[in-house]
Every structure is written in C-alpha cells, then in structure tokens.
Image: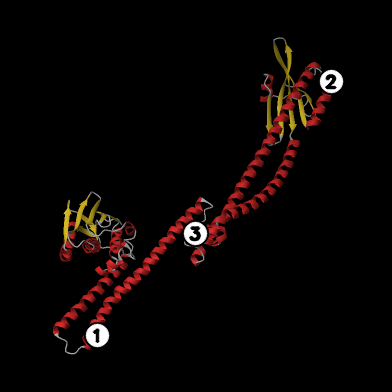
Amino acid sequence: MKWFARIKSELNKISFLRSIRFRMSVVIVLVGVICCCVMCFGILQSYFYRAIEVRTGDIQNQMKVLADHLVTYNYLQNPSSDVVNAELEQFSTLYEGRVIIINDRFTVIKDTYHLSQGKYIISEEVIRCFKGESVSNYDDANKYIEMTIPIQINSGESNQVAGVILVSVSTKSIENNYNILNHNALLISCLVMTGVIIVAVGVSHFMMRPFDRVTKEINNLKEGFSEEIITVNDYVETEKIVTAFNQLWQRMKVLDDSRQDFVSNVSHELKTPMTSIKVLADSLNTQEDVPVEIYKEFMTDIVAEIDRENDIINDLLSLVKLDKSSSDLNILPVNINKMVEGIFKLLKPLANEKKVDLIFQSHREVIAEVDEIKLSLAIMNLIENGIKYNREEGGWVEVILDADHQFFMLEVSDNGIGIGEEDKKHIFERFYRVDKSHSREINGTGLGLAITRSTVLKHRGSIKVSGEEGEGTVFSVKIPLSYIQ
C-alpha cells in the first residue's frame, strides 16, 4: 500500500493529470472503448451462435431427407445401395463431418470414416433417439455439432423407429469466418478508437473553454484589467462559480474599504489622546509658576486622555485574543442572573448620567457553563451601546433573561436611535461603524459589537439584531447552558 500511495502522490504532483480536461478526455475514451468492445463482442458472438444454429438446422433437414431415403432403399437391411452411399460420402465431404447409421440392434451398419462398422453403440442420445426424440448438441471444446436423427418407418397408425443416424459435423468454416470478422472488427475498433481520442481531446478542449475564460477574467480582475464584476454564462456551473466569485469579490472590497476606514479611525483615535496629552504637557512646561488649580485641571485632563487611550488599546487586545481558539476560554458554571446584575451596577452611573433607565427581567434563575469575564464584557458592550446611543429624554434599556432545557436567551432592547436596514448587515464586522461622525462624538473604536459577536460564537451561541431606525434596537443572544467542545 505504501508504494501505491507514493505513486498516487507523484501523480498528484503532475498538474495535467489532475485537470478536468484530461479526466474528461479519459472518461470519453473509456466510454468509447467500452461501447466499441461490447458492440464488437456482441455482434461477433451473435454471428457465431446464429451460424451454429443455421448450420444445425440445415443438417437436420438434410438428415431427415436422408432418413427417408434409407427407408425407401431399405438401407437398414441392405447397406449396399450406391445412391445412399454416394449421398453419405457427399455429405461427409461437404460438411467435413462423419455419419454413422445404427440399426434397431444398436449395430453400426455404416460409418463414413470406416472405423466403427459392425460395432455396437449404446449411449443416452441413441436410446433417446430410439424413443423418437431428436438430440442436437454443440461441442465447444472440440468445435463440432453433434446430433441424432431417428429413422422412422410408417406402420399405419404410428411411426416405428427402425434406426438412428448419428452425425458429427465440423464447424471449422464457421470458426474461420469468425476469425476473419474478429480481425476486421479489431482493425475497425482501432480506427474508431483513434477517432474517439481525437473527438475526446476536441470535446474536452471545447467544453473547458468557458472555465478558461473564467480563469482569465479572474486574473484580469486581479490585475486590474477588467470591470468590477465578471460574466461567463455559458454553463450553469460557470454562472454559479462567477456569481459566487463576484459576491466574494464585492465582500472583499467592502472589507478592504472597512479595513482602511478602521485604520483611519483607529489612527485618529490613538493619535487624538496623544496630541491632547502633548498639548497639555507642553502648556505646563511653557508656563512658570502654574497655579495649583490649573495644574490639577491639566493633570486631570491628561489622566482622562490616558484612560481613553487605554480603552482603545484594550479593545484591540480583546479582539486579538478572541481570534485565538476557544480552548482559551475559562469555562465554569456561572449564575447568569447575578452576572447581569453586576453589569447593571457597573453601568448604573453611566445610565444616570445619560438619563436612561435600566430594566432587568428574569423569568428564572439560569446557571450556565461560560467564561464569565469574556461573556460579561460582551453583554456589557450591548447594554452600554443601548445607553450611549439612546434618546436625550425618556430613554430606557431592558434586559430579559430566560432559558429552556438546552439554551439560555438574553434579549437587550432599547428605545434609542436604532439601526438602519443596510447597516444591520455590517454592524458585527470589526471594521465597520454605523454613524462615524456620531460614533466619534460618543468616543469608541467600533470594536464593541465585533468583540461581542466573537465571544458569543466562541460559546457556540448566536446573536441577532432587529428593530427600526429611530425606534430602538433589539439584540437577541442564545447560548447553550452546557458548553459544547
């Protein structure tokens, strides 16, 4: 098996042998070869056995006529008739066969080979023939047709079997014709196979042209020498491939644009606090005898900017960590009710500042196997977004917790500014921000929802968003109670 695997590995390295064009040609050639062989074999075998059948029928008819002559010339009692002997010799010479005449005492009275005259022949075929049954058989090993014909004498109401004609005829002429036909069939098959190979190569080349165009169009698009999308609609398969590629290409363009936008935003977010810190520090350095009050005010602003910078860096680090395998999760049984209550306590000051009411409804106590730190951060992002992107007066954020025998469901809803239908498709992308100008005023990197989605997926859960723009947003999270490896 090792040498077979090695040969297969070497063949896989030859790109031509792995191409659809080559394999299509091989399939067409194999189908042609099989069909040609089956047809030739079927025709030759049909001819051979039909020739045997026709030869057998001719011999039976002639032997029946000969049997009547034997009765007419009373050959069984007097086997010296020149007419009958001439017929027997002529038949033996014509068909390269042997004729034996047996009387009712199982004695051979005539053998055209002059070998068995006067001897007795008692066999199953002879006995059956004396009962009036003709027997014929083809001996494939010796290439002979053998048959027994009863010699019947009409005695009134019934025919009496007075003797048996035992015939053995060579099929050499049929074999010779069969060999000639077989040789001709072989020549014709070779010509047909040559034509099939040429057709196979041509058909495979023609059939693969659309796929070659797909490759060319993709390369042109990659090099920037083509339009925004490619179209090759020759086959359903090429149309599907092109459609999938166009969708992927558009997706990559969106991701690339979002990535560039993200780099620009993060660069701005990282640069802004540093600029502010530098300006404040320079202001302190250029002034002499700075009052303590101004010094404290400037230092407070510097600390705030450092905290802002730290938040951005922490978000980036969290996202990088979530890109690792789920084995990094610290899975433990956690009381989800207490976890949400703890998040509410942390966000209560921000909610009071934004004049937003926090509402928590729990239908039952929920214990689930989760990473408490990572999942707390994910849920906190949802609730914090609901607080930040809310209305100026009368705002609220509601969290509803429920569970069944397999999952727990967490719904975070608000009556804030909402999210547009087009933005809903992209809000979980790590490089996407809904309202860039508004988001920058609120302070944020646009990574919160990407972090949340990654965390939920690591827990083998799902997250969905709904709601209308201007009427609020609803995030629905569903996570298994027992962690699935």
Q: Which mark is residue 81?
A: 2
Q: Is residue 453 left or right of residue 226?
A: left
Residue at image position (80%, 26%) is 88
Q: How is the image coloured?
A: secondary structure
Residue receiving disc 3: 230
Residue 54, image x, y percentages: 72, 30
**Of circles 2 and 3, which is in front?**
3
Mark drawn on residue 441: none
Spatial CA distance of label 1 from label 2 is: 147 Å
Check the picture and name the quadrant holding the C terminus.
bottom left
Give the amino acid type for the residue marked by disc 1 in the picture: Asp
Q: Is residue 468 above or below residue 116?
A: below
Q: Work out how far the residue at label 2 is from the one at label 3, CA to CA, in angstroms.
A: 96 Å
Q: Residue furthest top?
A: 156
Label 3, label 1: how far apart the Cα atoms are: 56 Å
Q: Is residue 467 above or below residue 98?
A: below
Q: Please, what is the three-letter code of the amino acid marked with disc 3?
A: Ile
The residue beneath circle 1 is 282
- Disc 1 on helix, strand or loop? helix
Where is 285 relative to 417, above or below?
below
Q: Nearer the viewer, residue 386 or 192?
A: 386
| Residue 462 screen position, x and y as percent | 29, 55
Q: Tell me the kind of residue under disc 2.
A: Ser
**Left or right of 261: which side holds 228?**
right
Q: Looking at the image, which residue is at 73% across and 11% down? A: 155
Circle 3 SS class: loop
Question: Is residue 72 visible to the viewer in this orientation of the structure?
Answer: yes
Tell me, yes or no, whether the two marked residues, 3 and 1, touch with CB atoms within 8 Å. no
Q: Nearer the viewer, residue 65 or 397?
A: 397
* Residue 123 visible at all: no
